[in-house]
Image (cartoon, rainbow, N blue to C red):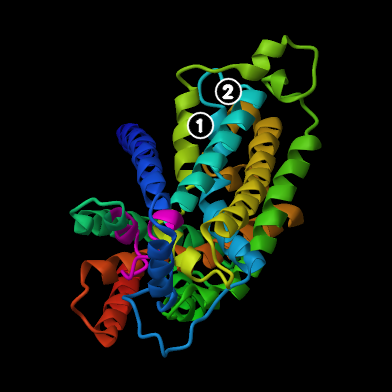
Amino acid sequence: EDLARLAMAARLVVVVCAAWWEVVAAGEAARASSLPATRRRSLGLRAKRLQGGGGAARPAQQQQHHMSGLELATCVVADLCPHGMLPLAWAASAGPGTGGLAATTLMVMFAGMATYTLYLSALIAEGSDGPPALSTVWSSAGFSRGAVVDVAVAALCAGCCVFYASFASDLFHALTRRLVPRRAVVLAALMAMPIAPLCLGDDLSVLKYSSYAGLVGVFFASANVLRVGLLARTPPPDPSWFASPTPPRSLWRCGPQTAVLANTLVVAYLCHYNALQYYRELEPPRTPARYAAVVAAAALLTTAVFASTLVGGRLAFGDAVKPNLLNNLGHDLPAVLAKLGTGVAILSGFPLMFAGLKAALDAALPSLDDDKHRAIHAAALLAVAL
């Protein structure tokens, strides 16, 4: 319980910081848009000489890898869904519960905020020649102490990578327990293939293929949860989640318990550690407006996945729903396939989270060359596995 309270307090801090950052960033974006057109074009030319991968800025003569809008949207969905879709039904059931329309409104609101802040990040840092880290956006907005941002992002991404590795190894160990009795062997095998080759690549474009696999896993898992909820034989404890003759205001039920859902959504829609990397790897013509459209499509698709698991989990399990929704599923074939799909989604999301860690480490250690950066990346991956 103490850890849960600490996690909730940390998420509330994130909410406050995100709101403050959006207000400040909006002002800086407005200031940047007021620059003369010739100045903005010169800044844009400098940005085009950069390579969009993890690490420091690279010479213009090296080949630039790009992703189409569809590929980038797939990466964003694979980045958001694995860690976001599992606890939402539990968060919506906290205390008296949050009404269905209120929960949906919150999801749409946070999806819009995530899209807008990613757009502002691209707009502010469009002409920067710094590494593709969040501290570059911070510095481009006129703030100092970007190293603090790098350390914070590195700590966040490292912790999430540890969670991903633990969750994936537990999940695949449960599925292969009869063949591989030791969890450490499963973890070592996953780290060797496919995690290490994907994590140690030079840019995000190599992850677009694994993201497609993750997208399939996400859709299958969320569809199965929704199927279980719709086929549940017993009525849900809170009828407001169905179209039933309850007072309409129950659909809008809010209260202190809604803060649990809001805090969960803050983390669920968080992929800003890769904001600048995503923007720089979008294929030409690359503009902040086009980037916003791609991210908005990804956020809309992510919201559909979140709504499926939230409503399906709530309908199927009611107040008995667990923070990890997979623990509520049985052992029949659809449940096993849903767990397998979630495992694939986590494996596809891990390299995207690790890319944020690489970018933050590279930005925090700008004086090192590429070989030393790669050695640090390998050491960080080993530390996560251990």
Tell me if I can see residue 188 in this picture: no
The range drawn in magenta is 122-138
For badge 1, the amino acid type reads Leu
Left or right of residue 2, residue 275 in this image: right
Residue in the picture at 41% in, 64% down: 38
Q: Residues within 10 Å of mark 2 (few under 14, many from 20)?
A: many
- Decide which of tag 2 and tag 1 comes sooner along the chain: 2
Q: Report helix, strand or loop for mark 2.
A: loop
For badge 2, the amino acid type reads Thr
Q: Which residue is mark 2?
A: 98
Q: Nearer the viewer, residue 178 or 13?
A: 13
Q: What mark, if any, has residue 261 been given in the picture? A: 1
**Quarter-of-image position of residue 76:** bottom right
Q: Quadrant of the C terminus?
A: bottom left
Pointer 2 with pointer 1, Cβ within 8 A:
yes
- Does residue 203 belong to the magenta stretch? no
Vertical comparison of 161 with 233: above or below: below
Residue in the picture at 80% in, 12% down: 245
Q: Position of residue 89 (x, y in %)?
A: 59, 35
Tell me if I can see residue 176 in this picture: yes
**Quarter-of-image position of residue 334:** bottom right
Q: Nearer the viewer, residue 175 or 103?
A: 103
Q: Position of residue 321 (x, y in %)?
A: 59, 34
Left or right of residue 75, residue 135 in this image: left
Q: What mark, if any, has residue 202 been given in the picture? A: none
Q: Position of residue 147 (x, y in %)?
A: 20, 59
Q: Nearer the viewer, residue 304 or 119?
A: 119
Left or right of residue 155, residue 90 in this image: right
